[in-house]
Image (spheres, coloured by chain):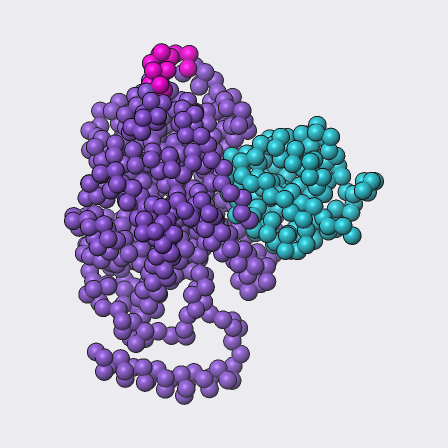
Chain colours: A purple, B cyan
Amino acid sequence: MGEMVEKIKEKRKEWEEECLEPWLSKSEREIKKFETLSGIEIADIYDPSDIAHIDFLRDIGYPGQFPFTRGVYPTMYRGRLWTMRLFSGFGTAEDTNRRWKMLLEEGETGLSTAFDFPTLMGLDSDDPLADGEVGKCGVAVDTLKDFEILFDGIPLDKVSTSFTINPPAGIILAMYTAIGDMQRVPRDKIRGTIQNDMFKEFHAQNTIVLPPEPSLKIIVDIFEWGVKNVPKFNLISISGYHIREAGSTAVQELAFTIADGMAYVEAAIERGIDIDKLAPQLSFFFNSHNDFFEEIAKFRAARRMWAKIMKDIYGAKDPRSWWMKFHVQTAGCTLTAQQPLNNIVRVTIQALAAVLGGCQSLHTNSFDEAWALPSEEAVRVALRTQQIIAYESGVANVVDPLAGSYYVEWLTDKMERLAWKYIEKIKEMGNGSMVKGVLKGIENGFFIREISDSAARYQKEIEEGSRIIVGVNRFKIEEDLRIPLLKVDPEVQRRQIERLKKVKAERDNKAVKENLEWIRSCCENNENVMPAVFEAVKSYATIGEIMGTFKQVYGTYRKPIII
Amino acid sequence: MERIRVLIAKVGLDGHDRGAKVLARFLRDAGFEVIYTGLHRTPQEVARAAVDEDVDVVGISLLSGAHIPLVPRVIQYIREYGGNPDEMLILVGGTIPHDDFPKLREAGVDGIFIPGTPISEIIKFIKEELPKKRKGKSK
């Protein structure tokens, strides 16, 4: 092997001197500097000498086996296609229930809930701060009553549902579990995901209510309750998606997501939760951006890193605990308002990268989303894009078909190395503890600054024209931008507040009060809040009342302003 | 010429601050005096900042779909707090459907910038349009 590599290196040098350089001296290159979207410098070509340090059996291997570079399942999409899961929600529970049923009829295989901003922030629809935002960019939920309507006619043992929600994640899990109980679905048949990842909110997404430490405490409460009560439910979706959307590079997305994941695992171990019990209920969520090969390399590197971390650093024994299962969403920030149909092509390339990277579930954006929430037609195209990749392109027929590509393997390894550097740095910031390191980075603005600097660099490239965005800074046209868009009924807020009033009038207010008191005492005595939250939800306490109780004990948080 | 003072504001519960922050940074680098409100401000808080800081330009960023009613409210409160929005340049950026453009203009918005707008274009707009608004402003 070594001899062969030496020979190849020699030949490569020869090729560069005798073939490449004379060619370059005669012709002008259109692009002067070649790098990935994350700024990793890339060579003209890759050959076996570039990956001589990579050991096939140790670093690549076979799917379903450590280190899972090639996928968590031995058969991958030959066994079962990824879950086609479109993030969707608007207006009232009735509006969203209708859209969901349409999507399921059209062949969607899992649900994913978009909540409106008041719900995401733990505010009731009648809160003064919610005025004007109810049902606008997602569905409004105040009490269990809304969930009953939302899941009307949707059997929880047949369909899994993902909930993109963070500060009130435990409340939403309690509501979903209550709906499962009402439908008499056994607890071990209830499947789905709550995002429940506050660290990335502090780094990037900004849906922040409580300070970092109590936020983490409640997340671990949810872990503890979830492993006992809903053993097939993903209790967290450790997310890089929003870090990337806020402007990070792919390497930062990879590194910060895994660092956050390590911190959650350490916090759970500290609580005394059995890591092999918890691990199967962890999931991840990544972005798929424009640089096709870089994204594929990122997904493969992420899986390999997580397997090593769980096995070697945290000592998980069950091979199942070493899996990194992840959802992918195509990059919302790459959608252009200009020439919106071009977005279909962007989404296709990004979705293809996710599939070639071995995702477990996928959301494809709709082409009109730089303008508004997607119209029915636009959502249908987004779903069809996945179906065409799955059923027509043939890419799902072979597991990890890009393995062995000199470039892809080199880049996978490179991204892993660069990500480890960041993780080491974060660990140092916490004197060996990832929990302390991540909290420190939140407190001193490390994550925000890293991401903001990358966002500014990206924008500068667009302004200068060194980064081309088709239809935005090149190939522009005069166009009529009035495309048909979804309109949310302006009456939603009034109707939602009416329902909330009715629920409050009809519920047992004494029980609500007692349950809220129970939650308060759990917070004050540092006990697990989830049993009390579950009872409160079942007595139709509102999200605002429960979050309000948390706020009274823990206070609120405003992140440092760093531009 | 004195430095142009710009307030970049996030109003409502929307947490998407990439655009607002990148714009704030580029305006600052281009020589503007920039004040950024940070996240989750109410229309009253934004209006209060605009009046207290005596800014020339108010740039409001929203990607939540709540621009109506929040943006008109900001303008209304600026007036209520003793400022004159007619002498300020009021800009809105984010995911704004075309159908809402007339309503925003009617409420007093001078410029609406959709995703993908080059920052150079926003700077050019401010430099060209602000002097027209300033007419009669005793400053």
Residue positioned most to the bottom: A18
Q: In percent of the image, x 41 and y 30: which residue is there? A: A554
Q: Is residue A375 magenta?
A: no
Is A88 left, or right, of A302 in this rendering?
right
Q: Is residue A505 magenta?
A: yes
Is A552 left, or right, of A477 in this rendering?
left
In x, y percent, where is residue B40?
Answer: 53, 36
Q: Main secondary structure of the magenta part?
A: helix
Q: Is residue A383 above or below residue A105?
A: below
In x, y percent, where is residue A484?
Answer: 54, 40
Q: Quadrant of the N terminus of chain A?
A: bottom left
Q: Is residue A559 above or below residue A44?
A: above
Q: Is residue A449 above or below residue A4?
A: above
In x, y percent, where is residue A96?
Answer: 41, 31
Q: Which residues are magenta?
A: A504-517
**Looking at this view, is B101 or A540 the one in front?**
A540
In x, y percent, where is residue A366?
Answer: 45, 45
